[in-house]
Amino acid sequence: MILRIDGMHCGACIRRVTQSLQRVPGAEVEEVRLGAARVKLPEGSSSDALIAALSAGGFAAHQES
């Protein structure tokens, strides 16, 4: 799944986003770059927990269709 993430500007943002996503149980972070992240979730899981974790970290995000 690919998430589009607003407000990322630097390497520190990439690190904070990565850490936020890694805190979500079952999430496997494959790649984080400016403006986006690719994350693998267990079958049947939704992106809601990922988006909530990013929001708590100060980043707005949405799942790419």
Image (cartoon, rainbow, N blue to C red):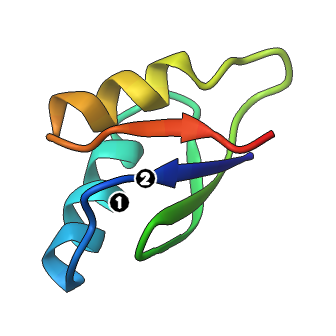
Question: Mark 2 sits on what residue?
Answer: 5
Label 2: which secondary element = strand
Image position of 29 with respect to 46: above or below? below
Q: Nearer the viewer, residue 10 or 26?
A: 10
- Residue 61 at x, y = what percent? 43, 39
- Residue 2 at x, y = what percent? 68, 52
- Residue 37 at x, y = what percent? 54, 60
Image position of 29 with respect to 61: above or below? below
> Which residue is depicted at the point 46% across and 20% down?
49
> Which residue is depicted at the point 43% across and 52% down?
5
| Mark sitting earlier along the chain (1/2) | 2
- Residue 22 at x, y = what percent? 39, 47
Q: Residues within 10 Å of mark 2 (few under 14, many from 20)?
A: many
Label 1, label 2: how far apart the Cα atoms are: 12 Å
Question: Mark 1 sits on what residue?
Answer: 18
Evaluate if marks 1 and 2 touch, with contact meaning CB atoms under 8 Å apart.
Answer: no
Amino acid type, label 2: Ile
Amino acid type, label 1: Thr
> Which residue is depicted at the point 76% across and 29% down?
42
Q: Is residue 54 left or right of residue 49?
A: left
Q: Residues within 10 Å of mark 1 (few under 14, many from 20)?
A: some
> Which residue is depicted at the point 35% across and 22% down?
52
Q: Is residue 65 left or right of residue 34?
A: right
